[in-house]
Image (cartoon, rainbow, N blue to C red):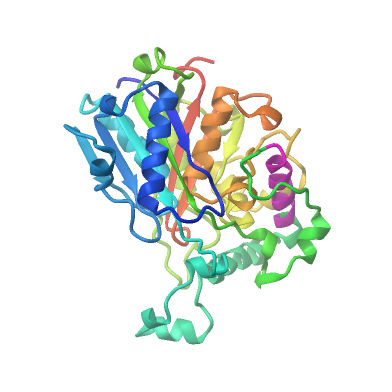
């Protein structure tokens, strides 16, 4: 299989960015990614889009960009796992000779000036009917509730504590201090975490991700071609997906394991590496709990030991496994799976500045979608596959 690489990265303004539609943000991100790679839009023969909460952008983005004679055009949506899935599909098509340069883009604009961040992902009461109405009557009206349920189950089974979750929030914010794009850069302490208000027990405000507007795109092409383009190539070593299909019933592993346990080994097998070879992690951190359980499922620590591992300081600056070096979704910005992917590109190129990890040889990127329903994994790095 021909080797592939990410050759371009495009990012719009991120955060409280108002007055631009998701399609407009997506178009801006694709143009920026192509320019970053040193390519013209006419050099692209593939476009993969992932729609946000509004259902936009769609494949009509190709017309907005003026793209013609495309060999690949599709929309993909596995929620937060979409970024990894898009890159894997693009790489597969390029390796097969079905495309030569593919833009993968996600954009969204759920924030409104007159609405709270929490309301951006709220569900309309009219959607509650049938058995959903019973869940609503019991208070299960938001994504936060289900992740709280998952976190509580992990706590009850393994003794995980709120303070251990707080250690993830603290280390992530420490990384965000070095990211000029981060929405939140002021340092926080474990005490700050413990004094932040409950959202849904056992999750506090500082356990929960931001809500952001913006767009991010990457250009995927052949590794040989990428070497001759404007920026250092980020080589794609491996990928995988996992969709466990947990049900909320007796005997389910919901909250204890995730799709990372499926997609991680698949990606590492393709890459020919083990968890011990990974030098940086960019993990989907919609909640601190998600980081903790993903670390376990990827094999960076034993099942049930994610809490002590996080509390040891391993994830923060100076730690053994730098994780979410740009501040992640907890402190930097929330663009679904494009948040960890964009930071992986920045780190692989050595563009991290004050937050650059000391070793960037192999970077693991995770995406998580739904209520732990979908997972994607990428292994990328600055060197061609198989080269140390």
x, y percent for residue 272 = 46, 25
Quick one: 63 or 244, which is closer to the camera?
63
Where are the magenta residues, as a range? 165-178
Task: Name, please, the residue furthest toward the left.
Answer: 69
Q: Position of residue 103 (x, y in %)?
A: 34, 34
Q: Quadrant of the C terminus?
A: top right
* Residue 64 visible from this viewpoint: yes
In this rendering, the answer to whether 133 lies above or below 9 is below
Q: Residue at x 39, y 18 (%)?
A: 226
Which quadrant of the figure has residue 280? Answer: top right
> On the picture, is 142 further left or further right than 198?
left
The residue lying at 25 percent from left, 47 percent from top is 59
Q: Position of 19 compared to 72: left or right? A: right
Where the N terminus falls, by quadrant? Answer: top left
In-front residue for pair 181/315: 181
- Residue appearing at x 42%, y 31% in the figure: 33
The reply, left or right, for residue 55 in relation to residue 72 is right
176 w.r.t. 258: above or below: above
Question: Residue 191, percent across and down?
Answer: 83, 59
């Amino acid at each position: 299989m021909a080797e592939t690489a990410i050759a371009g990265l495009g990012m719009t303004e991120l955060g409280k960015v108002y007055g631009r539609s998701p399609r407009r943000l997506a178009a801006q991100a694709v143009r920026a990614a192509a320019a970053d790679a040193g390519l013209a839009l006419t050099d692209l023969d593939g476009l993969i889009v992932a729609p946000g909460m509004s259902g936009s952008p769609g494949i009509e983005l190709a017309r907005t960009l003026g793209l013609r004679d495309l060999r690949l055009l599709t929309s993909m949506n596995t929620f937060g796992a979409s970024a990894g899935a898009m890159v894997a599909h693009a790489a597969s098509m390029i390796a097969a000779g079905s495309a030569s340069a593919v833009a993968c883009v996600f954009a969204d604009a759920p924030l409104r000036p007159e609405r709270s961040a929490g309301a951006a992902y709220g569900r309309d009461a009219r959607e509650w009917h049938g058995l959903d109405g019973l869940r609503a009557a019991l208070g299960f009206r938001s994504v936060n509730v289900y992740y709280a349920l998952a976190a509580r189950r992990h706590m009850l089974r393994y003794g995980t504590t709120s303070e251990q979750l707080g250690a993830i929030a603290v280390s992530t914010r420490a990384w965000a201090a070095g990211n000029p794009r981060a929405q939140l850069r002021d340092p926080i302490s474990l005490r700050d975490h413990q004094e932040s208000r409950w959202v849904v027990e056992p999750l506090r405000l500082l356990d929960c991700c931001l809500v952001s507007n913006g767009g991010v795109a990457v250009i995927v092409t052949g590794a040989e071609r990428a070497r001759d383009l404007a920026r250092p190539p980020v080589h794609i070593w491996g990928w995988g997906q996992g969709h466990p299909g947990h049900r909320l019933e007796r005997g389910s592993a919901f909250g204890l394991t995730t799709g990372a346990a499926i997609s991680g080994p698949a990606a590492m097998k393709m890459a020919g590496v083990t968890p011990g070879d990974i030098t940086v992690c960019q993990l989907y951190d919609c909640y601190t709990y998600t980081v903790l359980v993903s670390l376990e499922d990827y094999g960076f620590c034993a099942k049930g030991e994610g809490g002590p591992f996080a509390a040891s300081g391993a994830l923060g600056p100076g730690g053994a496994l730098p994780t979410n070096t740009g501040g992640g979704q907890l402190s930097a910005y929330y663009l679904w799976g494009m948040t960890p992917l964009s930071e992986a590109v920045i780190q692989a190129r050595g563009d991290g500045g004050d937050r650059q990890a000391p070793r960037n040889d192999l970077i693991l990127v995770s995406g998580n979608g739904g209520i732990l329903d979908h997972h994607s994994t990428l292994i990328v790095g600055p060197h061609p596959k198989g080269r140390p």
